[in-house]
Image: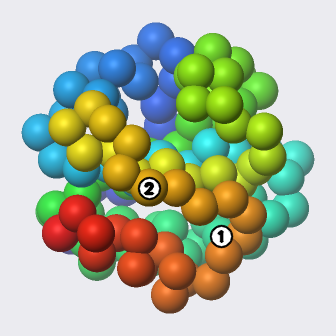
Amino acid sequence: MGTGVLDVDDNNFESEILKAEKPALVDFWAPWCGPCKAIGPAIQEMEEKYGDSIIFARCNVDDSPNTPAQYSIRAIPTLILFQDGKVVDQVVGAVPKTSLESLVQKVL
């Protein structure tokens, strides 16, 4: 079991995600976004299941505009999978939990 979904921002994104020892799945979201809220529980469940092997994080695009801009995020939710500081894959929109599981399996 992991330690919960990590909140990241423009200040700690590099240290927490890009320089992390483990792969990371980052959810770029906003509190006013309905689809973002819809996938939140699935991300939480996956963190409880895979949290020992992968970091699950979320970045509020309103509070931290620089990081989403760096990855050309145009729609939320966008989930980006990182490994060794590089983008492995990404999905846009409120996708089913099975799609998120498939994404995570790429780095396990």
Q: Which residue is mark 2?
A: 89
Say which residue appears at 73% left-offset and 64% top-offset.
93
Res 103 quadrant in image: bottom left
Q: Quadrant of residue 65?
A: top right
Q: Secondary structure under badge 2?
A: strand
Q: Position of residue 17 (x, y in %)?
A: 32, 33
Q: Observer-nearest residue: 55 or 79?
A: 79
Reading the image, the residue beneath label 1 is 39
The kind of residue tagged 1 is Ile
Q: Dot 1 lies on which element? A: helix
32 lies left or right of 7: right
Question: Which residue occupies the foreground of this view, 55 or 68?
Answer: 68
Whether residue 32 appears in this view of the structure is yes
How far from the left and from the top, in percent, is residue 100?
49, 74
Residues at marks 2 and 1 touching, judged by CB atoms closer than 8 Å: no
- Spatial separation of the CA atoms under disc 2 and disc 1: 18 Å
Q: What's under tag 2, amino acid-wise? A: Asp
Quadrant (top left, top right, bottom left, bottom right) of the N terminus: bottom left
Q: Is residue 89 above or below residue 63?
A: below
Q: Is residue 4 above or below residue 59?
A: below
Position of 87 with respect to 73 (left or right) is left
Could you tell me which residue is drawn at 25 percent across and 45 percent down?
Answer: 83
- Residue 101 sits above or below residue 75 on the image: below
Position of the C terminus by quadrant: bottom left
Name the side, left or right, on which 93 lies relative to 46.
right
Residue drawn at point x = 72 percent, y = 70 percent = 94
Residue 64 in view here: no
- Judge the density around disc 2: few (<14), some (14-19), many (≥20) Cα neighbours within 10 Å: some
Q: Is residue 35 left or right of residue 68?
A: right
